[in-house]
Image (cartoon, rainbow, N blue to C red):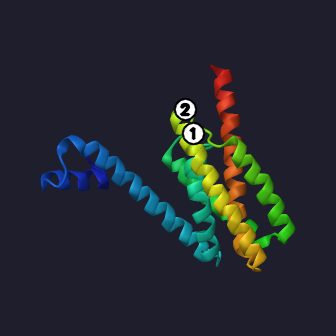
Amino acid sequence: MRSSVADRITDKLVSKEIIISKNRDLYTYGLKQGMVMIINLATILVIGIVLHMVWESIIFIITYVPLRSNAGGCHAKTQVRCYMYSVAMITATLICIKIVSWTGVICMSLTLVAGTIIFFLAPVEAVNKPLSQTEEALYKKRTHISLGLFIFLVLLFCYIGQLVISICIMMGFVVVSIMLVLGRVTNQLNRTKK
């Protein structure tokens, strides 16, 4: 029995012959993922509003999402856990941006350290979704391109006196680098258990 919103929408699209029934599962999955993304983005904006840090949350996410999508790292076992961890992570990150006495030197140093970790560790595959050599090469290339672009932006915004923007981008690096290290450690522990 189909009961989720995505299932009902997909059934409606099939009944109106907008999509063919053999592709039902693919469309249902896509709709569910789209809804999850919308809920996540709305949550991030709400956290940003509550902390009076809307622009900071947007800049952080613009950095974090493409890097994390390509670099991989530690993953939660369920979508609910992923959501809860994400809420905690974005809240902690924004509070950190707000309360730490940041300087250009600290920002650049953390950018260098986190960027180096990302450069050498990415991509880190999920335990249940190993990467082929082709996928690994593609994700590595995408990660390196994103990393280069964001490092340029950190330098640019530091240079023009917009340190807060550089800090938000740098925090994206820091969180992704932590996720990569955790992902590597988790993968290693899972391999030794087998």
Query: Where, by quadrant of the figure, is residue 121 drawn?
Result: top right
Helix, strand or loop under label 2: helix
Helix, strand or loop under label 1: helix
**Residue to which mark 2 is pinned:** 133
Q: Nearer the viewer, residue 176 or 80?
A: 176
What residue appears at the point 17 percent right and 46 percent down from the top-left corner? Answer: 20
Badge 2 amino acid: Gln
Q: Nearer the viewer, residue 164 or 78?
A: 164
CA gap, disc 1 to disc 2?
Answer: 6 Å
Rendered position, 132 above or below 54: above
Report if the CB atoms under discs 1 and 2 are less than 8 Å apart: yes
**Residue to which mark 1 is pinned:** 137
Q: Give the quarter of the figure containing the C terminus.
A: top right
What residue appears at the point 74 percent right and 47 percent down from the top-left corner? Answer: 117
* Residue 131, position as x, y percentages in the image: 53, 34
Badge 1 amino acid: Ala
* Residue 144, position as x, y percentages in the image: 64, 51
Q: Nearer the viewer, residue 118 or 17?
A: 118
